Amino acid sequence: MEIKGKVHYVGVNDRNKSLFENLWPLPYGVSYNSYLIDDEKVALVDTVDVCYFEVYLKKIRSVIGDRPIDYLIINHMEPDHSGSISLIKQYYPNAVIVGNKKTFDMIEGYYGVGGDRLVVGEGDVLDLGHHKLNFALIPMVHWPETMVTYDATECVLFSGDAFGCFGALNGGVIDTKINTDIYWNEMVRYYSNIVGKYGAPVQKALQKLQGLKIEVICSTHGPVWTEEIPHVIAVYDRLSRYEAEEGVVVAYGTMYGNTEEMAEVIAEELSNQGIRNIVMHNVSRTHHSHIIADVFKYKGLIVGCPTYNTQLYPEMEALLGKLAARDIKGRYLGWFGSFTWAGAAVKKITEFNEKLKFEAVGNPVEMKQAMKEDVALRCRELAVAMAERLKADRN
Ligand code: FEO
């Protein structure tokens, strides 16, 4: 499948895996993108998950037939992309692996692969004949060895995971030839869950790429971007700045519905106060990847749960741990909790916010056993405080 000039798509689709990294659901599957530049010298850019090697090899051969691969460029070493390195080297033993210093340490560690190598650094150029490839290091997007390869001849950026998203490719691969609707939410979920902790390195990478004329973005997951490049860059820019819309995520745990009643009262009052974007999640039912994505989307977060074995309700503890691990900045947090004989939930969430470092809003509400008028009133006061904090940002 030709992308531009002599650049071909040779990636594969995975509609079998339920959980990416055994953690994140894939309702639309995922693609592992790889690209072949069929120039005087042949270069393969990144590989695919090793489970798909047979179909991958067929795709490569459909482009180059019996010609050898001269260079195997590795922009990123996570095994969803590096997994086929050993097999590629078995089929193409003379392929020179191209990577930076950190890449080769990982290649040896993961695959024990030796042979010819070309160590590249910032600004180095590899001439394939017609295509001139430039390398730029973008460490910690989202691993230390990550780099991008820029084809100055065709203005194609091979960006690794940057600008990627979940979602297999159904037929076409280029944005202008497919319906891209499903990919935008999947981009937010991909970014927030996989890359989310590394906002500052992503910002550095975006600044580094600013001067380049980019007509095509070939990332390792999701569509090849052309017309939608400004939209894609805007999404990554906004998310990596931790910028968010006005809105509140109400995430709650509940065992018998009593704590859920608190969440309902809070949400209703948020709406009364003129907040339109309110997203409610039962933390035991909604996969946390969706909740994390919504926390990246909206500025306000209100969490609440029952006390469980004198601790936090386990699913809430898990969610808060995942949020804390992402160093999300600039969010407002309100919280509530319940207990039957000894309260711990509110105290534990208060302690958790030392890790989250979100701006505390309003007074936490603690309920004994079931909803009463004074509890409902305090829930409404918490919602009003959150709405006022959000509205203060309107100007
Ligand atoms: Fe798609 Fe970081 O691997």
Image (cartoon, grey):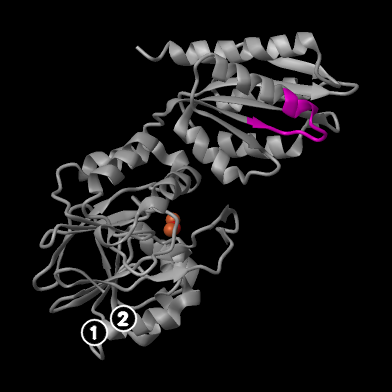
Is 339 contained in the magenta span? no
Above or below 90: residue 235: above
Is 254 contained in the magenta span? yes
Q: How many numbered discs?
A: 2
User: Between residues 254 and 139, which one lies in front from this camera angle?
Assistant: 254
Q: Which residue position is annotated with label 1? A: 64
Q: Is residue 30 left or right of residue 204?
A: right
Is the C terminus in the top left, top right, bottom left or bottom right quadrant? top left
| Crowd band around label 1 with a 10 angstrom C-alpha radius: few (<14), some (14–19), many (20+) | some
Question: SS class of the residue under badge 1?
Answer: helix
Q: Give how far across and how far down residue 206 sits, in percent.
A: 27, 41
Q: Is residue 288 left or right of residue 185?
A: right
Q: Which residue position is annotated with label 2? A: 60
Which residues are drawn in magenta? 251-261
Q: Amino acid at mark 2?
A: Ile
Structural distance between the alpha carbons of marks 1 and 2 = 6 Å
Question: SS class of the residue under badge 2?
Answer: helix
Q: Give how far across and how far down residue 7 sits, in percent.
A: 20, 70
**Residue at left offset 24%, top offset 61%:** 120
Is the N terminus in the top left, top right, bottom left or bottom right quadrant? bottom left
The residue lying furthest to the right in this view is 341
Q: Amino acid at mark 1?
A: Ile
Q: Give how far across and how far down residue 236 sits, in percent.
A: 34, 41
Is mark 1 in CB contact (under 8 Å) with mark 2? Answer: yes
Q: Find residue 22 and name its label.
A: none
Q: Is residue 328 visible?
A: yes
Above or below 22: residue 264: above
Q: Is residue 305 visible?
A: no
Q: Is residue 372 left or right of residue 145?
A: right
